[in-house]
Amino acid sequence: MFSTAFLDLPALQGASGTVTLPGSKSISNRVLLLSALCQGTTVVHDLLDSDDTRVMLAALRQLGCGVDVQGTTVTITGLGGRTWPTEAIEFFMGNAGTAMRPLTAALAVQGGDFTLKGVPRMHERPIGDLVDALRELGCAIDYLGNEGYPPLHIGNPALQLDKPIPVRGDVSSQFLTALLMALPLAAQNRAITIEVVGELISKPYIEITLNLLARYGIAIERQGWERFVIPAGSRYQSPGTIHVEADASSASYFIALGAIAEGDGIRIQGVGADSIQGDIRFMDAAAQMGAKITSGPNWLEIKRGAWPLKGITLDCNHIPDAAMTLAVMALYADGPTTLRNIASWRVKETDRIVAMATECRKLGATVEEGPDWITVYPLPSKEWKAASIHTYDDHRVAMCFSLAAFNADQVPVRIEDPKCVAKTFPDYFEALFSVAHANAQDIPVICIDGPTASGKGTLASRVAQALGYHYLDSGALYRVTAYAALKAGLSLEANDEARISDLARTLPVRFEGDTVWLGNEDVSDAIRTEQAGMNASKVSVLPAVRTALVALQHSFQRLPGLLADGRDMGTVIFPDAPLKVFLTASAAQRAERRHKQLISKGISTTLDSLRADLEARDARDSSRSVAPLKAAQDAFQLDNSSLSIEASVDQVLTWWQAKQPFL
């Protein structure tokens, strides 16, 4: 997951490949709570690992449920037949509506001394209609802040089950879902009726709830969409094991990607047209706009069909979350697209109508909006603007606007706070980059060159971490090559040059901060000995090996960008890099740094000898015939003799920001 302050998406050309989606958030949190209300254990497979599910799991642990997490398989030991906690418990619900609403209802029906709080945005999300319905039932709930909003305190109820319980259906379907999941706890001796007041929105989410309740032994009698009856004698029964479908809402971004991007198409694994999730119907809306879609029992394939896409007018009551993706698809259409019946957008993680309109306008689009609708006009060529997208701590805003990077004008898009996708799809951007394509010249590279012990490796890895870019330590490549060659039984001489170069072309090396991996082996310490340095010098003079490693270094230029450090990154390997930095420090300062490093490892040495060695190495590196150490003509000079690493990082980031087009 990218945890940077922002993530810059370069201009993306096309996309093709396969994406396996994480589990559904809606199904995951329903299944967790239902499993907790059962007697015995339930094994849940393919559970979504996200902020929202972690919130629910933490709450279940506080209640005394057994929770055993093994990757995406979670075993829940339920509360059925057991005594619920009598002590006061405070729950932190983050911004997880799919956890807050149903847990509130279950706790209120069961009774206790419970407080539920969340992040500031959760305290702005209405819950009054659910509280009103629960109070009608006889539950004891008090507001601890603003009337109608969390935080809440729950006490012991005096349940009154002799008349239908009214609940509004036109604000959020989660209120009805919460009641449907909680009321079986009180239906042992008599049937309980729920009456929906007003038009029920997001009906497909209620279908998910009813489907899952049936799998846990609760057969709800539905009378249209107005009345729901929980039969007398209802009791939760564990299904033993249950699998969570992949998230159909998350599928919308890759369905849209297949419709927008040039390429061989996108295959989505984990969900198909027969999904129990209403958001799978997003595929019908995408097809109306021109996408070519085929599907199987657990997969979808999407290719670009009509181009430009077709503008549509659509009632989105059945796909409220996924419909946000249509607003960005509309930018690629042949006419305006109007999305109606989306009032629920205003009470989600943010006011999504305002958010989508504001950010589409940043890109250059004309947008009209109303209480429960939005119209987005397409952006023709030459009118796209490079924009920094504010994400409002809303995962869907971040994922939707990543699709704007495929624009006709090839302008980049910045996504602020990319880690907000952790709510439902922590690895979303990694999945996007696994199938997206870009021209090599559009994938940014920052080069940091400099002499030995100048600190370029530390600086480069820190800048890479700040930007979310890949990192290349070119000097380590020669050390790893020598290490791998010796491990393969080769000599480091000219007679094995061809075999070493073959090995170097496909060297499975990667850099993660200060750690260097060769396949699954951590070789960080092994390649940083004096002997490893001498071995690197031996392979570096073999022309075929150097050629192979140049190609390998070019392969590190991958989305979203690259930080490369070495001695010839800006002059030889990436001469067209948009930012080049030549890092220097006095020989005395570098000797002192190296001295501290060696002493910390228990290696005895002197400052004078180290300084003499560094000065001699500088002379050799500067005078060598192939790729001598020198600053590129367009490189920024950075003398860090008296700078901290933090100051050096800030300087490089300042230079980089100055080259970006975002306003």
Image: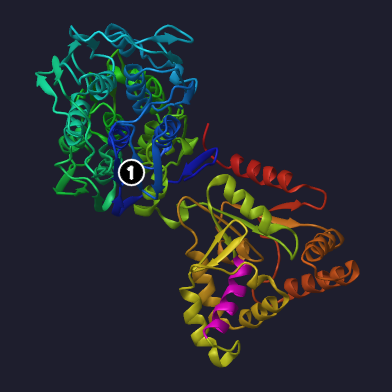
User: Which is nearer the eye, 424 or 14?
Assistant: 424
State whether residue 580 appears in this view: no
Q: Is residue 494 above or below residue 592?
A: below
- Magenta region, mostly helix, strand or loop? helix
User: Which is nearer the eye, 40 or 18?
Assistant: 40
* Amino acid found under the numbered disc labelled 1: Leu
Examine the structure image and report whether residue 380 is included in the region drawn in magenta.
no
Q: Position of residue 662 (x, y in %)?
A: 52, 35
State whether residue 413 appears in this view: yes
Q: Is residue 653 above or below residue 364?
A: below
Q: Is residue 288 above or below residue 176?
A: below
Q: Which residues are magenta?
A: 474-488
Q: Position of residue 562 (x, y in %)?
A: 53, 55
**Residue located beneath label 1 in the image:** 47
Taking the view exactly as shown, the residue that stands out farthest to the right is 608
Residue at x 78% of width, y 51% of height: 640
Query: For residue 75, what is the image quadrant?
Result: top left
Mark 1 closeness class: few <14, some 14–19, many ≥20 residues within 10 Å:
many
Q: Position of residue 96 (x, y in %)?
A: 40, 28
